[in-house]
Amino acid sequence: VLEDFAAGRRLLASVGDEAGREARALGEPAIAARLAAEEAKLAAEVFDLAVMGEFKRGKSTLVNALIGADVLTTAVVPLTSVVTAVRWGTEVEATVRFLDGRREPIAVEEIPAYTTERGNPSNAKGVAEVEVAYPAALLRAGVRLIDTPGVGSVYEANTAVTVDFLPRADAVLFVLGADQPASQGELDFLGRIRGHVEKLFVVLNKVDLLGAADRDEAMAFCRAQLARVLGDATVRLHPLSARLALDARRTGDARAVEASGLLALEIDLTRFLEQQRATVLLTNARRRVGACLDELAGRLELRRRAALLPLETLDARIAAFRAQAERIAWSEAAIGGLLGAARRRLVDALEATHGPFVAARAPAVVDTLDAAFRTGSSRRRALVGRLQRALEQGVQAAVEAWAAEQAARVHDEVAALLDRLQEQANVIIGDVRRLVRDLFATDVAPTLEPARFSVEPPLARVDSAFSLMLDELPLLLPGPLARRVIRTRFRAAVPDELGRNLAAATAEFRQRLADAERAFEHDFRERVAAMLASLQAVLARARDDRAREATDAAAASAELEQHAAGLAALRARLTALGRAAAA
Ligand SMILES: Nc1nc2c(ncn2[C@@H]2O[C@H](COP(=O)(O)OP(=O)(O)OP(=O)(O)O)[C@@H](O)[C@H]2O)c(=O)[nH]1
Ligand SMILES: [Mg+2]
């Protein structure tokens, strides 16, 4: 097996090398870079086993259990925000790789400051990935365990991070929760994963929360759903308690490790890795190299077709392409419209909740004030201080409850918006394809990476601007009367304080939403422009070919022929490698 792998890798690397040379010769540096990255991954024999699933299913806990140590942070709130890769190492080490390419070693205790919503909100620190080295047996064979952010939480950006990682995963360990039946969103995501990886492991975690009967029922339900979604009844479902497994691992209790379900999963994983890691690595690399070759071939075909046209015709069509492309870019205005409309709808909906919420919640805050009034010293200064704190706490709790209620609304609205944005992106891709087909009678499949859009729900940040000026108090009033006046003023302030803080939270949210839209529009525009520019570059090369052809027609078209033949030969070699591997 090892020799086969070495030979397969060498052969594939030589296809990749030549494909890279073709890409550079054809003026396609982006594709050349993708091929180079693929080769580097294959050379390092890095097998990425990605742990994925909805938020809070226990992914990070499971990775900890698999390595037998509390290295990754876990919590009851949506937490993991950055991809964390755990690889083999004799020493425990952690390194942060930033989006701008910088790398920085950090202490293991610092990991949460980079990988969690709490320590690194909205990934403000610009982290691409954190890599942790750990001496765990499972990692020894060159597998990296990838802990990914949960999908489907209110933190849309986390979903995007995980979806972006999907094409790089070599196999996926999908985590379901026994305490929640598999949701449609979860199953849709699973179906999507299936399109990317050949090997899928599925875990039903948290079975410790269920009794034997409920557990059997949960297993049966999940199995049926898996069979339906994957169209394959052979995927094994592992019942597991990651929490008990981690405890058992830490205390070195082998029997408890077995009882937790972890041992069975490990055996399954290890067997797969021993027998198929090499094959799967090669298959995945072949598929990705194949995609690069197809893209190169499509673009070369466009260039050849275009270069067959008489120069005047070609110039006219290039001009037509540019003009139409501008109109396509202009139709991006539709995107701005979608964004603006979604923002208005969302902000209006939030504002409409203020009045009813204040009316419903004010009495509870007044009760808090009354309770504070009755307990403790009756000296005026102390009383005012106490009521002020009570008011602040009451308002804080109320605004938190409001923000939590609105989070679901924001989530739904953003999810619907993302669907509409994706549709628009597909419309643009379709327009470009049709345009190329109409003008040059060939099909290119341009890639338009969906730009990211995310916004965090409203925050409950309460300020304490309200204060009862002691100086303004009727200090000369006798004690009991003064206390009553103080209490009345505080009680009267409740609705205003609530309303003011809701308005502030909504205004702050509106601002963030507007910022997120601006960033998205900018990003989207750049991506569309890059796609159009790359096709225009192909056409410009075709024009050069054509112009050159006037002087040396035979040589120019022979050169393109040669590239086309070269790409076809590489494709054939790749297919043969695939056949040989399957045999
Ligand atoms: N009862 C029980 N709780 C578990 C188990 N595994 C994880 N949990 C708990 O579930 C919560 C979420 O665990 P995490 O490991 O942070 O979940 P996650 O999937 O990484 O969450 P995100 O990173 O936010 O997507 C924590 O409170 C864990 O202690 C388990 O097997 N049984
Ligand atoms: Mg996590």
Image (cartoon, helix red, strand yellow):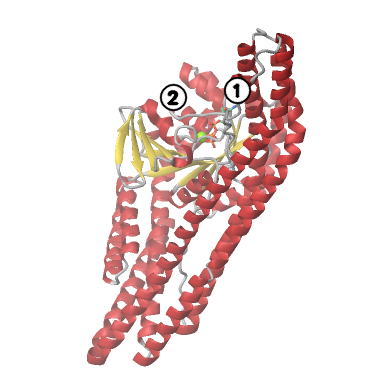
Q: Is residue 186 left or right of 576 when viewed as pictured?
A: right
In the picture of the structure, the residue carrying the numbered disc 2 is 69
Q: Is residue 537 left or right of 463 when viewed as pictured?
A: left
- The residue at 35%/74% (across/down) is 537
- The residue at 67%/12% (across/down) is 476
Q: Whole-percent x and y of residue 372? A: 69, 15
The dot on residue 469 is 1
- The residue at 48%/41% (across/down) is 122
Foreground residue among 351 and 296: 351
Foreground residue among 455 and 235: 455
Foreground residue among 276 and 299: 299
Q: Is residue 493 left or right of 123 when viewed as pictured?
A: right
Q: Secondary structure at mark 2?
A: loop
Q: Amino acid at mark 1?
A: Met
Q: Whole-percent x and y of residue 79? A: 52, 34
Q: Whole-percent x and y of residue 479? A: 70, 9
Q: Is mark 1 within 8 Å of ligand 1?
A: no
Q: Secondary structure at mark 1?
A: loop
Residue 491 in which image quadrant: top right
